[in-house]
Amino acid sequence: MSTLLPISVLVSGSGTNLQAILDAARVGSLPVRVVSVISDQPDAYGLTRAAKAGVPGLVLEATGGMHRQEYDQALGALLGESDPGLVVLAGFMRILGAGLVRDWEGRMLNVHPSLLPAYRGLHTHRRVLEAGESHHGTSVHFVTEELDGGPLIAQAKLDIGPEDTEQTLNARVQALEHRMYPAVIRWFAQDRLRMTDGRVELDGVRLEEPVTRGEEAWLRSSAE
């Protein structure tokens, strides 16, 4: 039986991507073991999802007067106690400092709801609609010191229709993330994916661009 990769998942909200990871791990399509779920929000529903799955849920709030460096040190200590092989950001809304990111370089992933490098930051669905874009999507990347700027691993692309709203785009993008994010984590757990000298390698080949698939391809994809 292959060894399961221990991972820690960081959340701030409802944790739908966390649930997708937990579900995939439960049915055996994702060879990981979630060893901790950490949130900066004590009422995050992601903590409830963790409890239902029997996973330790930890809260680390940024109390009044706490500097970012102090928070990062405390978060780094929690991660050190969990000792994951991979840290997965799944809707974690705090910006991590350079020191913490360097400590986990090549072992920290993030998913962002846009086709990076376009539309970094918040409110991506609203912004793409206001800009009149014809395409939208989501990206998974290694985390670096540059906000939403780490090396891209995979992207899911969708066409924006005239009927789309912020709400419909959010639902469509999340459905893609729930397929793509576990797939990328699976690549890492299978030792197929790594970051070397700031570049992404998949199956020993350096990627010149992220693995990109359309909406239908990701939604019908199975374990790889």
Image: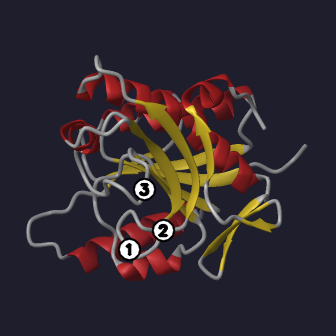
Question: Residue at 33% across / 76% down in the picture?
Answer: 97
Which residue carries the number 2 mark?
A: 150
Colour setup of the view? secondary structure
Asked if labels 1 and 2 touch by Cβ distance under 8 angstroms, the answer is: yes
Q: Which residue lies furthest to the left in this view?
A: 64
Give the residue drawn at x 62%, y 39%.
213
Crowding at mark 3 (Cα within 10 Å: few <14, some 14-19, many 20+): many
What amino acid is at disc 3? Leu
* Screen quadrant of the N terminus: top right
Q: Is mark 3 on a helix, strand or loop?
A: loop
Mark on residue 146?
A: 1
Secondary structure found at label 1: loop
Residue under label 3, please give it: 116
Q: Are marks 3 and 2 in contact (CB under 8 Å)?
A: no
Instruction: Point out residue 42 in the picture as x, y percentages from the top left corner.
Output: 25, 44
Q: Quadrant of residue 118?
A: bottom left
89 over 126 or under it: above or below: below
